[in-house]
Each structure stands twice: as structure tokens, then as C-alpha cells.
């Protein structure tokens, strides 16, 4: 599990037990995190080397699971490709998740992220889907795909 990002590890830890002892959170003086606390994504999403690693991980997973895509397509992503990858990953995680037929992807994106409990969904703007490859949105959207891939890989274990 050491290869997983910290965000996926936190997610798995939080999901592993819904009942927590007070001592885990540092005693009575420290309160357990509440649902209203904002979690910041501390992955270095804007670093080129980290983006290359995320792209490679996404590429490897997709190809190993039968989803054909080229590295070039991941490097210059188009909206329809992003939607296809996103839908495939969410469906892999939850085969019963129902994407609305005929609905705009922008309307389905954030609810789908919340359904799979993406911890940083509050930091994502669905308007970014209009131009997924733009420099300001791509690192975060690639981070979404990478997180979903890591979750899919954990599910396989």
C-alpha cells in the first residue's frame, strides 16, 4: 500500500472504520475531524514530473484493464476522451452507478465524484470540463483520474 497516494490512504483509513475511539484523535482535548472540515489536496499536481507519473499510472491501468488509449491522447486530452475515461473508472468502482442518459457531463461530474467520495470534490469546478487540457484545469482533472485509478487498483487487491 506504500505506492498509493496519501489521499487514497486517508480515504481507505476513514472508510475502514466508522467507529473511532477518542484516543486515536489525541485524547479528549482534540476533536475528531468533522464532515464540515475542508481537506486540502496536498499532492504536487502542478509539478511536471508528478503529472508525468500520474499520466503513466493512468495509462498503464487503462491499458491493462482493456481500455485502449494512447499516451498522446492522455497528453493532449479532449473532453470526450476525459468523459469516457472518467465514466469507465467510476463504473469500474461502482457498476451500479447510473449516469443519466442525455445529461451534460458538467452536471454529472461533481455528483459522481461525491458518490465515489473523492475527498477534494469541493476544489473542482465543473466549468473546467469545457477545456480539460487547459493549463489551469488539467493538473486537477488529471489528479481526479489518478485518484480513481488508485482506488480501482486497491479494489483489485
Image (tube, rainbow, N blue to C red):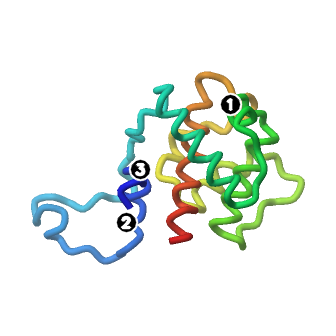
Residue 58 vs 74, above or below: the answer is below
Q: Earlier in the sequence, mark 1 or mark 3?
A: 3
Residue 123: % across, % down: 51, 39
Element on which disc 1 rests: helix
The number of callouts visible is: 3
Element on which disc 2 rests: helix
Residue 43: % across, % down: 41, 39
**Quarter that holds the N terminus:** bottom left
Going by the image, does 76 lie left or right of 9?
right
Residue 42: % across, % down: 38, 39
Of the pair 137 and 126, the residue shown nearer to us: 137
Of the pair 36 and 99, the residue shown nearer to us: 99
Residue 83 vs 29, above or below: the answer is above
Give the label on residue 100, or none.
none
Residue 1 vs 40, above or below: the answer is below
For label 3, the residue is 5
Q: Mark 2 and mark 1: span between their CA atoms?
A: 33 Å
For discs 3 and 2, the disc positioned in front in the rendered view: 3
Residue farthest to the right, as pictured: 102
Q: Earlier in the sequence, mark 3 or mark 2?
A: 3
How many other residues sit within 10 Å of disc 3, few (<14), some (14-19) or many (≥20)? some
Give the label on residue 75, or none.
1
Identify the residue at horizontal 38%, vertical 73% (top origin).
Answer: 16
Q: Earlier in the sequence, mark 2 or mark 1?
A: 2
Q: Mark 1 and mark 3: span between their CA atoms?
A: 21 Å
Identify the residue at horizontal 62%, vertical 31% (top origin).
Answer: 138
Identify the residue at horizontal 67%, vertical 24% (top origin).
Answer: 134
Give the label on residue 14, or none.
2
Q: Are marks 3 and 2 in contact (CB under 8 Å)?
A: no
How many other residues sit within 10 Å of disc 1, few (<14), some (14-19) or many (≥20)? few
Amino acid at each position: 500500500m506504500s505506492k498509493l497516494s496519501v489521499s487514497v490512504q486517508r480515504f481507505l483509513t476513514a472508510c475502514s472504520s466508522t467507529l473511532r475511539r477518542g484516543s486515536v484523535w489525541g485524547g479528549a482535548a482534540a476533536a475528531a475531524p468533522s464532515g464540515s472540515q475542508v481537506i486540502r489536496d496536498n499532492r504536487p499536481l502542478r509539478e511536471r514530473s508528478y503529472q508525468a507519473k500520474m499520466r503513466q499510472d493512468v495509462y498503464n491501468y487503462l491499458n491493462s484493464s482493456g481500455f485502449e488509449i494512447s499516451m498522446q491522447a492522455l497528453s493532449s486530452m479532449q473532453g470526450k476522451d476525459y468523459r469516457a475515461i472518467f465514466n469507465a473508472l467510476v463504473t469500474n468502482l461502482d457498476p451500479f452507478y447510473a449516469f443519466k442518459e442525455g445529461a451534460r457531463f458538467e452536471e454529472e461530474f461533481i455528483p459522481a465524484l461525491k458518490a465515489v467520495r473523492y475527498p477534494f470534490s469541493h476544489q473542482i469546478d465543473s466549468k473546467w470540463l469545457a477545456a480539460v487540457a487547459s493549463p489551469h484545469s488539467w493538473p486537477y482533472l488529471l489528479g481526479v483520474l489518478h485518484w480513481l485509478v488508485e482506488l480501482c487498483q486497491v479494489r483489485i487487491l
